[in-house]
Image (cartoon, grey):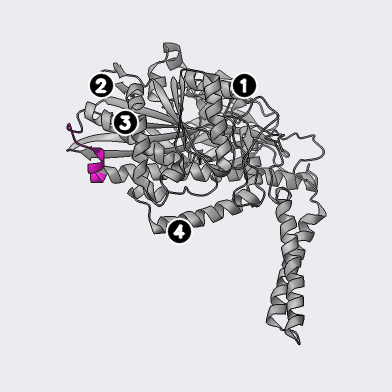
Amino acid sequence: SENFVVSHITPEKFYVEACDDGADDVLAIDRVSTEVTLTVKKDVPPSAVTRPIFGILGTIRLVAGTYLIVITKKKKVGEIFSHAIWKATDFDILSYKKTMLHLTDIQLQDNKVFLSMLNHVLSVDGFYFSTTYDLTHTLQRLANTSPEFQEMSLLERADPRFVWNGHLLREFIAQPEIHRFATPVMHGFITMHSCCINGKCFDWLLVSRRSCFRAGVRYYVRGIDSEGHAANFVETEQIVHYKGSKASFVQTRGSIPFFWSQRPNLKYKPKPQISKSVNHMDGFQRHFDSQIISYGKQIIVNLVNQKGSEKPLEQTFAKMVNSMGNGMVKYVAFDFHKECSRMRWDRLQILVDQLSEQQDEFSYFLVDSEGKIVAQQEGTFRSNCMDCLDRTNVIQSLLARRSLQAQLQRLGVLHVGQRIEEQADFEKIYKNAWADNANACAKQYAGTGALKTDFTRTGKRTQWGLIMDGWNSLIRYYKNNFSDGFRQDAIDLFLGNYSVDEVEPASPLHVKKDWKFLALPIIMVVAFSMCIICLLMAGDTWTETLAYVLFWGSASFGTFAIILYNGKDFVDAPKLVQKEKMD
């Protein structure tokens, strides 16, 4: 069905009707009591204003009262096994209250800020949904389910890790009869391509699902929480569909799973700090227990530097896997930057070869055209670097290609001895899709496109790629220091880690800034300008000029040093939820 729902708006109620299934049900949301009930079409007043929408994202309480968030534009991504998959491209936030007269100026201001936070989250690319297919589960999870599971609504059976509007739909979840009006939405990346090799055509898909537990922006959310949820956790599934047979290979990425932080402090690369005060093993063990339940055996592929500031993280990770002593978890460390220094990216093959035996043992999921399960994936590779973006994506694309090679041979698409790398047309689609995947994940976590995608796209590291990486790194630096606090707060509000309290007198948005915030940068700018002016307008003697330049130069340098020393106070930090009480 093209048009999923139509909303009718009256001063008293929002009415939402599904246009597709001939059912008479209409969802009625009372704008005063916020009660949600089912009614019938003839109860919708003729005076109601009608507009097409494509789904309900959910409801949220802000300072001014409750808001309804709806999907107003969608774009078709393609079809998975003849189910339409959509990307939600535009949203609307509708206020239940008809006026804002009940608010003070400060409340109005706060309400505006909270609305802009919601709009920020919704403006980040990557929200996907389907009204007929369960996007949150891998093919293997879907194949191993009970008949009861098949009967459930999409909302009930979805994997809570990957439903980004779970909090917004909490009112709906409690009422099973209205579930079909609620659309579970996943955040991440989906791409689909019809490909041909040797004249045999198959569908190739890549799906990345971002976890909404411990979600956030790069420098404010690192490591794990006490439940064992890792930051920036993404499950990536590659699917092949050929003549009714379906194959799938799943990998995961996630932050290094113990308690560490790397708060912005104006330095280009803040030093990561491992927490000294907590017991890391509890959370660490929880993390891997849940990974083993979801995916089976684990091979950790740790790509961080084995020298410098990343070294302690590598050593701690290795030590903890060792002392956990779980036969289901193996640890492999590969110093990506050192091994591939001076553009020697061919050396990645060393790692792929090292993992090949394990990969063959893990296998992949395969179901034939009759629906019989031929093979199951027995374990996953859990890759990480520091951000789990750039280095991680490169390695994942290589492991996925190796799995695809085996699948296409088994399905009879590739002849014996043929290699994917030699299929130029497919190879181009493959590399670009993985680079797009890296970009989507990076924009969602670090705020800019990924680095190193020139290698993923072309198989070569280029000079232009280095320049673009430099530019992206610069933008990342700015965003990480001066706009990430807001981005973090926005995500916490959206996911329900922070709830707006209507009666709360003092909002956490108003943190009084210390005098030094304004004074020091102003002094620095003035001193630096004076230094330049003294250079340009030379004094009577060069000694006089030198004295002035030295004085203003040291004043600007001194204030700069004080600012850097207090870097933590100058960055834009989150105000709503304290992620860790560590520093």
SS type, badge 3: helix
Q: Does the magenta stretch include residue 424?
A: yes
- Regarding residue 191, the answer to whether it shows in the image is no
* Residue placed most toward the observer, 58 or 549: 549
Q: Which mark is residue 369?
A: 2
* Residue placed most toward the observer, 86 or 533: 533
- Relative placement, left or right, of 287 versus 327 is right
Span of residues in magenta:
414-425
Q: Residue 282 carries which label?
A: 1
Residue at 61%, 43% (x, y): give it: 219
Residue 331: % across, % down: 47, 27
Query: Which residue is farthest bottom?
Result: 540
SS type, badge 2: loop
Q: Is the Cβ of the residue at disc 1 closer than 8 Å to that at disc 2? A: no
Disc 3: which residue:
403
The N terminus lies in which quarter of the figure? top left
Q: Residue 467 carries which label?
A: 4
Between circles 2 and 3, the one closer to the viewer is 3
User: Tag 3 or tag 2, which sits nearer the N-term?
Assistant: 2
- Regarding residue 298, the answer to whether it shows in the image is yes
Q: Label 4 to label 1, Cα distance in Å?
A: 43 Å
